[in-house]
Image: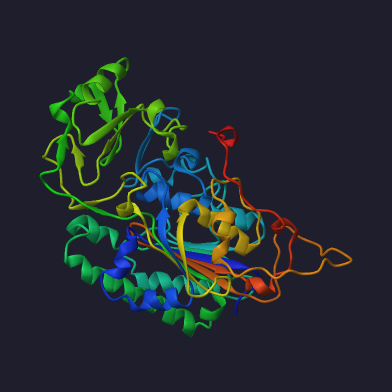
Amino acid sequence: MCRSGPSCCSCPLMAFRWDYLDRVPTPNFRILIDDGVMVEQVENAYITKTFPNHYSLVTGLYAETHGIVANEMYDPVLNQSFSMETDSIYDSRWWEEAVPLWVTIQKAGGRSGAAMWPGSDVKIHGMFPNQYLPYNASVSFETRVERIIEWFSGPKEEAVDFGVLYWEEPDESGHKFGPQSSSMDEVIVGIDEKLGFLINELKKAGLYEKVNLVVTSDHGMTQLFTDNIIELDEYVDRDLYTWVDKSPVVGILPKEGKLDEVYSKLVDANPNMVVFKKEEIPEHFHYRHNTRIMPIIIEAKEGWTIMQNRSGPFMFGNHGYDNTLRSMHPVFVARGPAFRQNYVKTSMRSVDLYPLMCHILSIRPQPNNGSLVNVKDLLYPEPTLSTPTIPPRVQEYSYAPVVGSLIGVVMVLGFLVVYIRQVTLRQLPSLKHRSREMSQPLLQEDLHL
């Protein structure tokens, strides 16, 4: 049923906070946790928005390096604007500062599939995934699951090795109600039931025991209140700047010659926001070295909203805040032949998922900000094999004799599933390129912007 060789799949749930698991009964998540691994705290990429974090998950890069720095962007070199609400997202120039995993695996001779993942319906470096669904929010989760399982179950020459699946909840409901609302209980129960559907469909297809399933998300969600609104019109004239990105991290593009004036009017204007000139953004955010990051960034304190005035729509839940805040942290659960059982890890970074998937796929990763060493304890230890007299021949894309699968589920503004077909690590040959860590954190001088 499955192509012989390593494979991987990821499925994210958008804005599924790490602590949602303990809020209501989630029996299907518990099945995966008991039979796999869980990470208690995952630090995602700054800013904690949808498009930046989805691209970090499949590139292992921080936003300043992969170039998708926000959901709304302006590029002064291109003199173009990007918005997740417009067709600008299909312009490949926005995406080609990095190489997503589906491009890397296809160049290595593998095949990939993507169901609604942001960027997967864009031709990046001359490639689409071998199989993909153009984004359409009206397509049900069940249909997305059925399609990606078909891709993994195809004939040997057509089956995919890597797949991603995206789902919009619980992000949409979190924005509407806020994470503290009792209405979210039913939403979380529904997500768990959808995960149960995925598990059952994998079993029906004979893939469940061959697949490594990763369930994660792009970010969390925090509660907002109508009393906690910062109105920029009270502090600075709109004629002095262009509003580029939205709350809680607002990108401000001052009109020519007005940078210092705009900054001086904002920097001490309100104690519930922090104002940075681009060069002053803290280095630990990894959010400074890209032309698409605006000259002034305003970051709201947790639970506060920045608006130009109160005439705009208000959301009771939002994300995008400081990525060290626990409310911004996503869930991470994984299960399959590559992963240990009943194992809990304290913390990881979302950029570490990329080198982990490359390791399972037996492909060489692109330069990235993640580290396999940080997450290798999630995997079964590889067997120590005696060195053969004649070293095995290693091709660029190595296929193992027994097939397993990895399904990664990443919860972001929705539900993401990453499937990775892979051999149980105990059965993998000792590959030359695995004799060292497959990815190292990039030093600043290694970043090509």
Residue 19 at x, y = what percent? 31, 63
Q: Residue at x 50, y 54 (%)?
A: 58
Query: Horizontal placement of 26 versus 443: left or right?
Result: left
Which image quarter holds the N terminus?
Answer: bottom right
Q: Is residue 202 left or right of residue 229?
A: right
- Residue sticking out furthest to the top: 257
> Can residue 233 be seen?
yes
> From what the image shows, is residue 328 above or below residue 95?
below
Quadrant of residue 433 within the rendered picture: bottom right
| Left or right, residue 57 beside residue 197 | right
Q: Is residue 208 above or below residue 53?
A: below
Q: Where in the figure is residue 272, as x and y percent of width and height?
A: 20, 36
Residue found 61% across the figure and 57% down from its top: 105
What is the quadrant of residue 384 in the picture? bottom right
Q: Tally the marks.
A: 0
Q: Where's residue 248, x and y in %?
A: 26, 42
Identify which residue, 229 or 156, lies in the foreground.
229
Q: Position of residue 249 (x, y in %)?
A: 30, 39
In the shown orientation, is residue 98 left or right of residue 176?
Answer: right
Q: Is residue 338 above or below residue 173?
A: below
Applied colour scheme: rainbow
Residue 417 visible from this viewpoint: no
180 versus 262 height, above or below: below
Residue placed at 38% from the left, 72% from the top? 143
**Residue pictured at 13% horizontal, 35% vertical:** 309
